[in-house]
Image (spheres, helix red, strand yellow):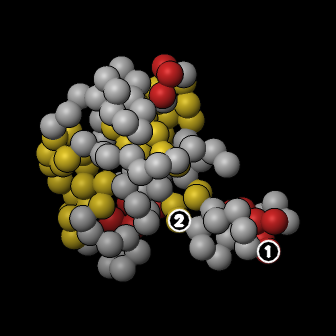
């Protein structure tokens, strides 16, 4: 079932997620269902890849801050039932790099699954494309 920011059709309650809890430690935990902010949607995760950076980041202190739902390579069903693939790089859209089309080097960028909750869960909140 697809969800939107106002949780129309939302499942409610906790969801299972793979959470980085400490360097070298990940746990399958029940976490609260994401509550998307304005401009974000809830995506029902259907597939998630494990990247080498997940393995590296889970072992290296300071790379990710626990607790964190990892997973930056995922796809699923978005609001309205459409299939979506996630771009994990969230850029500001305002800095010089973004204005030149180089959003991947934005000074204020965040990466889903590194700086904010990712796709190793039933649902993930994702910012709408700008």
Query: Which residue is most to the right?
Result: 100
Label 2 vs 1, first from the N-terminus: 1
Please tell me how crowded label 1 is: few (under 14), some (14-19), or many (20+) other residues with Cα within 10 Å.
few
Q: Please indicate, yes or no, whether residue 86 appears anywhere in the rendered image.
A: yes
Q: Dot 1 lies on which element?
A: helix
Query: Which residue is at the front of the view, 8 or 109?
Result: 8
Q: Is residue 72 above or below residue 109?
A: above
**Which mark is in front, 2 or 1?**
1
Q: Is residue 11 left or right of residue 87?
A: left
- Quadrant where the N terminus lies? top left
Query: Which residue is most to the bottom?
Result: 62
Query: Which residue is at the front of the view, 79 or 57?
Result: 79
Q: Is residue 59 left or right of residue 94?
A: left
Q: Where is residue 61 in the image (x, y as percent from the top left)?
A: 32, 79
Q: Do the residues labelled 2 and 1 touch (CB within 8 Å)?
A: no
Q: Which residue is drawn at 24% across and 65% down?
A: 67
Where does label 1 land, which residue? 96
Q: Where is residue 84 in the image (x, y as percent from the top left)?
A: 55, 31
Please tell me how crowded label 2 is: few (under 14), some (14-19), or many (20+) other residues with Cα within 10 Å.
some
Q: In this view, does 82 lie to the left or right of 91?
A: left
Query: Which residue is at the front of the view, 31 or 93?
Result: 93
Q: Is residue 123 above or below residue 55?
A: above
Q: Is residue 39 above or below residue 48?
A: below
Q: Residue 110 carries which label?
A: 2
Whole-angstrom CA distance, mark 2 to mark 1, is: 16 Å
Count of labels shown?
2
Q: Residue at x 47, y 49 (%)?
A: 38
Q: Is residue 45 left or right of residue 30?
A: right
């Amino acid at each position: 079932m697809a969800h939107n920011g106002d949780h129309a059709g939302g499942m409610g309650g906790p969801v299972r997620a793979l959470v980085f809890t400490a360097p070298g430690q990940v746990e399958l935990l029940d976490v609260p269902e994401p509550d998307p902010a304005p401009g974000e949607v809830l995506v029902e995760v259907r597939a998630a890849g494990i990247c080498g950076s997940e393995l590296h980041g889970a072992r290296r202190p300071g790379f990710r801050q626990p607790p964190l739902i990892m997973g930056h390579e995922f796809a699923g069903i978005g609001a309205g039932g459409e299939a979506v693939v996630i771009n994990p790089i969230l850029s500001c859209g305002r800095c010089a790099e973004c204005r030149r089309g180089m959003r991947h080097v934005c000074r204020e960028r965040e990466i889903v699954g590194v700086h904010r909750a990712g796709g190793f869960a039933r649902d993930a909140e994702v910012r709408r494309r700008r």
